[in-house]
Amino acid sequence: MVFGQVVIGPPGSGKTTYCNGMSQFLSLLGRKVAVVNLDPANDALPYECAINIEDLIKLSDVMAEHSLGPNGGLVYCMDYLEKNIDWLEEKLKPLIEDHYLLFDFPGQVELFFLHSNARSVINKLIKKMDLRLTAVHLIDAHLCCDPGKYVSALLLSLSTMLHLELPHINVLSKIDLIENYGNLAFNLDFYTDVQDLSYLQYHLEQDPRSAKYRKLTKELCDVIDDFGLVNFSTLDIQDKESVGNLVKLIDKSNGYIFSSIDSSAVEFSKIAAAPLDWDYYRYPLLVLLIIFSNKSFISCNFYVILNGPDAQYQTTCLHRSNILTIWTKH
């Protein structure tokens, strides 16, 4: 079982910088990291990549040969990669035994909410190579300073989440630079938690460019609220605490924290009975994946509340109409 991240986001959101910083951070935690560059337009890499799509196809060659622009060329490159997925699988085989994977994708947003080629590439890798991937969607934090751009970022995030169908974390990158773009209309929590978007209406109407679209904007905000899927984490890639908090979220979403657990009721009972010393960076999360052979157990939902020394682990097992709740304190 191999774990990793699919790093996506609009141009300029900091994907390559993120891959560089994240690979260094994970290496310091003791993980063997392999960065896979799947952006054929990225010819100045600050990191050492284990696999580079330019060994298969180059955007400049595609543009010259087929008289395409950058956007059309990137779509062609993704189509070509999808048809030659065997090349990527062969390159990945030596890495899947013991590496954590970071996939650096192009910044053309149409690839992730409109076209199917990038999604097909990801799905084929997941099925054939048993990958456990989380989509990390980077959005430049300065978009919060403009209500219209913020709503656009929300729509893009929602569309991408629904299109990719992966464990998904939206991230406001470059959060350390947000003050350089002016004052926010609301507290930062309003933007990260995506609270009541009706409060944005007043600020949108102050902009003559968006005032005439206020009805459309209101309907779009209602769609975002109705789905209730979008929220954001924040990231300063140069702050180890900020990166560490994001790594915790990613590890929970793709299951990395469960990777060293023997998933049996017997092991769970042993863990539940023993006192535990919690240290995230030294130990995997010790608990919570029980596989029941009894088919009547139809669903398991796992919740982890990490609040220092009084951390509580709750496993809720749905057994037809009965609910069994197991609490373990450490």
Image (cartoon, rainbow, N blue to C red):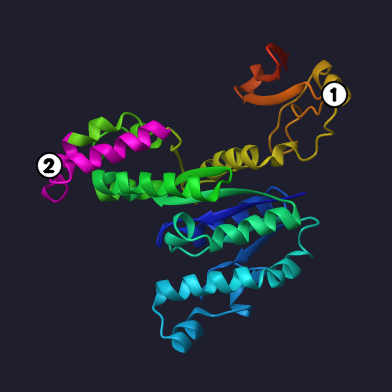
Amino acid tagged 2: Gln
Q: Is residue 212 magenta?
A: yes
- Residue 109 lies, in percent from the top left, at 43, 59
Q: Is residue 172 left or right of residue 316?
A: left
Is disc 1 placed on a helix, strand or loop? helix
The residue range painted magenta reads 202-227
Of the numbered discs in the image, which one, if any, rests on residue 170? none
Q: Is residue 169 magenta?
A: no
**Residue drawn at (61%, 62%) of the image:** 121
Determine the image quadrant of residue 23. bottom right
Q: Does the residue at mark 1 contact the one at mark 2 (Cβ under 8 Å)?
A: no
Q: Nearer the viewer, residue 258 or 29?
A: 258
Q: Is residue 40 left or right of residue 198?
A: right
- Residue 140 lies, in percent from the top left, at 38, 52
- Residue 223 lies, in percent from the top left, at 35, 37
* C-alpha gap between disc 1 and disc 2: 59 Å
Label 1 environment density (alpha carbons within 10 Å; few <14, some 14–19, many ≥20):
some
Please determine whether, in this image, residue 165 is positioned above or below residue 121: above
Q: Earlier in the sequence, mark 1 or mark 2?
A: 2
Q: Which residue is mark 2?
A: 206
Most common secondary structure along the magenta stretch: helix
Label 2 environment density (alpha carbons within 10 Å; few <14, some 14–19, many ≥20):
few
**Residue drawn at (83%, 18%) of the image:** 274
Amino acid tagged 1: Ala
Q: Residue furthest bottom?
A: 65
Please determine whether, in this image, residue 261 is positioned above or below residue 146: above
- Is residue 307 in sight in this rendering? yes
Q: Quadrant of the C terminus?
A: top right
Q: Which residue is mark 1?
A: 265
**Residue drawn at (39%, 78%) of the image:** 69
Determine the image quadrant of residue 81. bottom right
